[in-house]
Amino acid sequence: MQFLREKKFKQAIAQVKVEDGQEITHEIVIVTLRRVVHFFSALQASDGHWPPENAGPLSFLPPLVMCLYITEHLNTVISAEHKIEILRYIYCHQDPMAVRIIHVPELGNGFLTMVVSPAIPSWEKTWLSIIGLYDWSGTNPMPPEFWILLSFLPVHPGGPILPSSLDTRFLVG
């Protein structure tokens, strides 16, 4: 959507409303297809590709910021401009139904925390416990038996890292 804003895209073709039981005519299909083609043409970059929004690597962002905060290197490694972009990204991708944001002014460096549901995954509880925002008694450690599972099983802890919602659970600055 940022790409559409940069190109100042405006959908000029009116949306077709199809009611229940209404027959879908040739004209309705043509107008809808024109609208779709207009939209995807606007999404296409000047060199012909469609730039995706891929947040995969950004799932490592919250643990990185937490580690930098714990080691007191947050302001050394992450510039003020990067902090603004991190906040912008997380504000745009947070789940408003899952979290409530709280600002902690006494931390003084712009670090924000949030209250999260106790139903979050255990690895997220672990990260919250590391930075002192969640009680360690609420975390469930991974049983060591997981490490002796066959490595091709999807639950093996040494397997590939899958995209997660970790980047939408924490808000840091």
Image: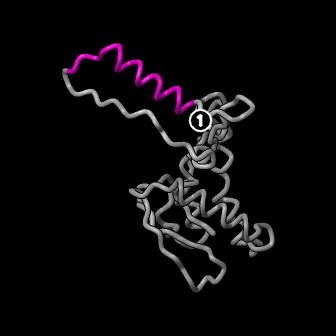
Give the residue at x 35% y 13%: 26
Q: Is residue 37 on the magenta stretch?
A: yes
Residue found 68% across the figure and 64% down from its top: 65
Q: Quadrant of residue 51?
A: top right
**Which quadrant of the figure has residue 153?**
top right
Task: Kindly identify the residue that appears in the image at 64 percent across and 33 percent down.
Answer: 44
Q: Camera-side residue: 9 or 57? A: 9
Q: How is the image coloured?
A: one colour
Position of residue 158 relative to residue 25, above or below, is: below
Q: How many marks?
A: 1
- Where residue 28 sits: x, y (%)? 34, 20
Q: Position of residue 144 (x, y in %)?
A: 61, 47
Q: Which residue is mark 1?
A: 42
The kind of residue on which mark 1 rests is: Ala
Vertical position of residue 114 compared to residue 2: above or below: below
Residue farthest to the right, as pictured: 76
Element type where label 1 sits in the image: helix
Give the extent of the magenta segment: 22-40
Residue 117: percent from left, percent from top? 41, 61
Quarter of the figure with the C terminus: bottom right
